[in-house]
Amino acid sequence: MADTMQLRPSTEWYDKWIGKMDTKLMCLQNCRNEFLIDKVDERLFIYLNRNCLNFDWKNHLLLIILIETTQKKDVGTTQRIIGTLNTRFKDIFTNFNITRLLDFDVNVHLYSYLKSEIFPNDSNNKRFDLWRCYSVAEYHTKKWVYNNLSFEEQEYYKKFLLQPTTFDSRDFSFRKLALEHAQVIRKDETDAIVPMLPTIRAEANLRWNQMKRLREAFHQQIQEVETKSLSLPIEFFYDEPERIGERFHFRLWDKPSFVLHHQTHFSKSVIKQATQRKLTYSNKNNAYFLEFIRAESLEGESEGEGLWFNELIEFNVLGYWFKNRPIEEHERILKVLSLWGYENEHGQNPTSFSSSHKGILTPSLFIALNKYKAQGLLIDVEPFYAACTFGLLATDILTTTGARINELLQISNTKECILIKKVKEKLHFSFKVIPKGRDSIEEFYISKQTMEHIQTVARLLKEHYATEKIPSNLYRGVRRHLFPKPMPYYFQYEGKVMKKETIYSCIKFLLHGLVFETQSGKPVTIKTHLLRHAFATEAVQRQNVNIDIVAKMLHQKDLNVTSYYSEPTPSQISESVSELHDVISSYVDIDDAYLRSPKELQQQFDEHAEKVGVYNKVLGGTCVTDFVCPIKMQCLGCKAKVPEPDQEDELLEVIQLSKDMEKRFKSIGLEVEVRKAKEMAKQAKIELKEIDLIKQYRKERHYETATKLNPFR
C-alpha cells in the first residue's frame, strides 16, 4: 500500500504563523515532496518569531532558513546570517525612513551603508559581515529556486529573493581592512599563546590539584561534623604544598547556621525557619559551603595570595553579574573585566564566567543572595570543582589534539567512541567523533594523560548521579541533528549535556589570572580557537610541516584556513592509567591480530608502521599522529610527539651527544652541522622543561590534605 501523502507541514510553527507568514512559502517542498519547514531546527524559528515578524523581510528570511537547511548548514551559521540581515536592515530602513522592501534599493541603500555614507562609526568588520551574509544568502536562495522549481513556481517565489547587487566587495575598502585587522589581532594573540602552551597545560593541572585539595578538606570537615555531631560553624585550616607555601583558613557553614549567626541581616520569619529547620532550611534542602577567611605565608607573618579564583568572588563577576546592579557597580565590574582582557567584541556585557549550566561554576542561590553578609568569601565547592574538572579535560584535549569544541562535546562513554589498542606491549588511546563539515566519524589520538582526565570526569559523573554508569542524555550542540539518540556523553551535568558556552566558562575559570599579552601590551584571554591557531603557527612556521599534513591533523577540509589555526605543544602524560574498566571501550591487541593475519595484511601493517608513528615509540616520548610523518622522522621537537617522563634519560643523552657532535664538527670546519647540533640540544632542553612541569604537578597530585580545627571565634 502506498504511503499517504502528507497534506500540510507537521511542525507547530505552521499553525502559529498562519496569517503572519506566506502560507505557500511555509508549504515549500523538495524533490521528495517533503516540507522543508519540517526539517528546520527550532532555534531558527524561535529567533524569527521573536525578532522578525513585524518586518517586511520576514518571508525573505524564512526562505533563507529553508534553503540553508537543505544545504545542511550549521544552525549557528544560519542564525548568524539571518541575525545580521535583520539587525542591519532595521538600521538602514530606519535611516532612510522606509518600511517596505519594495522601496528598498540594494544598489542605493545597501551601497550607502557599505560606503560608510551612513552609520560612519560602524566598524569595517560589521560592514564586511553584512556584505558577506547578504551575498551568500542572495546567491544560495536564487540558485536553489531556479534549479529546483518549475517556471511557474519560480515566478511566485522570486518575490522572496534578495535583490541582486551590481557591485562587489572590491568597490569598498572595508573588506581588505576588515580581513587585515582580523589577521593582525589573531596573529598577535597567537604569538602570545604559542610559547606558553606547556605552562597553560601545567597550570591547569596544578590548579585542579589545588581545587581537589580544597574539596577533600571540605568533605573531611563535613564528615567530622556529622560523625561527632559538632555545631556549625567550625573553623579549620590546612597547609598547601611547598611550592605554594601558604596556610588557608576557612569556616564551614550550612544554611541554618549561617542565618543564625547573622540574624541582623535576616527577617524574623527566615530566622524562625532556620531555627526550626523547615522549608528552605530543612535537612532535605540543606547544603554545606565554605567561607574563606585568609591565607598566610608559611615563610613568615606576611599575608598569602590565597586561591587563584578569590578575586572573581571578591569582584562579584561570576554568573550574570550585570543583572540588577547599580550603575556604579556595573561600570566598576566592566572596568575590572576589561583589565583582565574579558571584553565582548560585540559591545555586550562580557559573560566569561557564566556557565549557563546548573551546578557548574555558578554558586547556589543562597550564596549568591547572602555573599555580602559574610566577613570572608563564600565558596560553593561542588560547582567550582565540577568547573575545574571539565575545564581540565577540555584544556588537555584542545591543546593535544587540535580538536574543535563541538568535537570535544561529542566524546561519549561508548565502545564506538573510546578506543584502546595494544601495540608492541604499549596501550594507545583514541576517540572517534564527527568533525565539522563531515557526516562520518574520524579518529583523534590521545595520550594516557587524557585518558586519566576522562576517567576523572567519569568518576565525578558517577558520584554526582549516584550510579554505576554514566546516564545517557541528548546532545545539545549546533549539529544535534546528527545525534538524535541519547548517549552517555562525558561533558554533561545535572541531566543535561553541556553547550560550548559552558566549556568556555570552565576553561576561563581554571586559567584565570595567567598573564598573556601581545607585544603592544594588550591582555589576551584563552580562547579555544587560539589553541588551534597555535598549532598551525608552530607546525607550519617553526617545524615547516606541509600544510596538507597539518590540515589532516586538525581534521580540516579547507587548506586556505589551516594556516590560521594553531598546533598544540606536546601533550602531557600521567604515570599510569587506572581503572580502565570504568571506561566502556573497544580493545584491540594489534600484536595478536598481526600474528593471526594473512601475509598480505601483515605487509600492509608493516608499510603503515613505516609511514606513520602512532604505533611507535620515539625519542623522548610517543608519536600520536596517524598520517605520513610530518617532519621525516626528525622526532626531536616534533609537535606530534607526547613527552614521556620515563624517557627523560634519552633526552639527556641527546644533549651530551650534541655537545660531542658540536665539538667534532667545529674541529673540521662544518659550521652548518655545528648549528644543527646546537638546535638538537635546544629542542631536547625544551622538552626536558615540559617534562619537569609534568613531574611537578604529578607530585602534587599525591599531596595529602591534612586539616586542623580551630576554635570558632
Image (cartoon, rainbow, N blue to C red):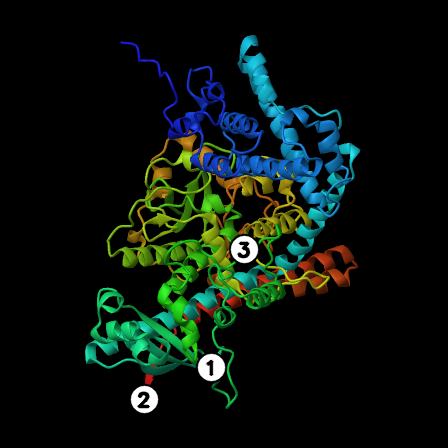
**Residue 596 or residue 584, whichever sits in front:** 584
173 to the left or right of 364: right
Instruction: Tell me if 646 is positioned left or right of 665 in this view.
Output: left
Identity of the residue furthest to the bottom in this view: 301
Residue 605 sits in quarter: top left
Which label sits in the foreground, 1 or 3?
1
Labels 1 and 3: the sequence-earlier one: 1
Contact check, label 2 and label 1, Cβ < 8 Å? no
Residue 327 location, x and y as percent?
A: 57, 65
Q: Amino acid at mark 2?
A: Pro
31 over 490 or under it: above or below:
above
Using the rendered view, name the quadrant where residue 236 is placed: bottom left
Depth check: 626 or 177 in front? 177
Read off the residue under disc 1. 246
Image coords of residue 663 (percent x, y):
71, 65
Q: CA distance from mark 2 to mark 1?
A: 20 Å
Is label 2 in a helix, a strand or a loop? loop
Mark 3, residue position: 570
Where the C terminus falls, by quadrant? bottom left
Q: Which residue occupies the foreground of this view, 270 or 342?
A: 270
Q: Amino acid at mark 3?
A: Pro
For disc 2, the neighbor class at 10 Å (few under 14, some 14 to 19, many from 20) is few
Q: CA distance from mark 1 to mark 3?
A: 31 Å
Q: Is residue 106 above or below residue 346?
A: above
Q: Secondary structure at mark 3?
A: loop
What residue lies at 51% left-to-right and 51% top-to-bottom? 398
Name the residue type under label 1. Glu
Classify 10 Å Cα crowding around label 3: few (below 14), some (14-19), many (20 and above). many
> Residue at label 2?
711
In the image, is 242 to the left or to the right of 327? left
